Image (cartoon, rainbow, N blue to C red):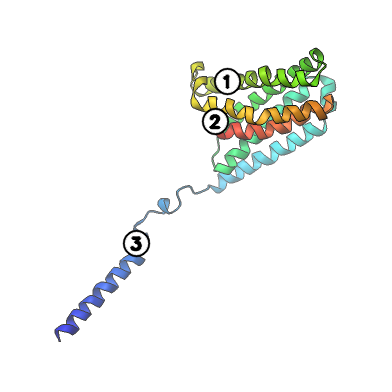
Amino acid sequence: MSEDIKLSHLNARGEKAHNNVLTVDDDIPPSHLNLNPASKTLKRKLVLYLIIEALISTVIYMKYDVLSEFHSLLAPALLGSSTAAFAQSINQYSKSKFSASKIYKFLLWGVINGVLTVLWIDMLNFQFETVLYRIIIDQLIGAPTFQIVYNILSAIWENGDISSIMSPVHMRSLKYSYCFWPFFSTIAFIFLPTEAFYPANCVANLIWNLILSKLSS
């Protein structure tokens, strides 16, 4: 009789423990079950931004020569801004986070970068006939200068303190730039005609701005 009682107690305790295991998730708030729930509204907004930016970039790219007839810097500025914003939106979509201010900042950076890049390329082609010299000057002076300009603007946007350009994030971006741009610069100066240099540069900038977006997020 005592053995039956002990067995019944054991079974009761076992069933109770089993029930506790099955219902343990009931005590966890839904927010903890899904730490980063993607808002459908947010996703739709980001998709809309991506579609608009992709269409605008495509149209500008196709009408690049036409836009350049109005002003030599108009097409580079527009294509630079649209591809920079597109890169930022891709990064935000991948993280399910939306920040209009960052998109606007990259729009502005794209304009600045586009104009400076065209002026820089024209200067290199005019001053140096040898391709090797163009590549060397571009990487020794151009690459770090452009990255420092971006770091200064980024520091001003973030906290208004230019001294923060020496932060680990900004120094890391400078290091990564030397892992990316020398390859493009070499290929572009050797194989691409002058008129195709900047449109190709915008494609490279799209990839680079994706990297910058991740570093600055």
For the residue labelled by badge 1, is the local secondary structure a helix, a strand or a loop?
helix
Which numbered disc flags the more N-terminal residue, 1 or 3? 3
Whole-angstrom CA distance, mark 1 to mark 3, is: 50 Å
Residue 79 visible in the picture: no
Q: Which residue is mark 3?
A: 24
Q: Which residue is mark 2?
A: 216
For the residue labelled by badge 3, is the local secondary structure a helix, a strand or a loop?
helix
Q: Quadrant of the N terminus?
A: bottom left
Res. 153 mark: 1
Q: Is residue 163 above or below residue 98?
A: above
Structural crowding at the residue carrying mark 1, measured as other residues with C-alpha within 10 Å and reported as few (<14), some (14–19) or many (≥20)? some
Query: Residue 47 falls in which quadrant of the image?
Result: top right
Identity of the residue drawn at 84% across and 27% down: 193
Which numbered disc flags the more N-terminal residue, 2 or 1? 1
Q: Residue type at mark 1: give it.
A: Leu
Identity of the residue drawn at 18% across and 79% down: 6
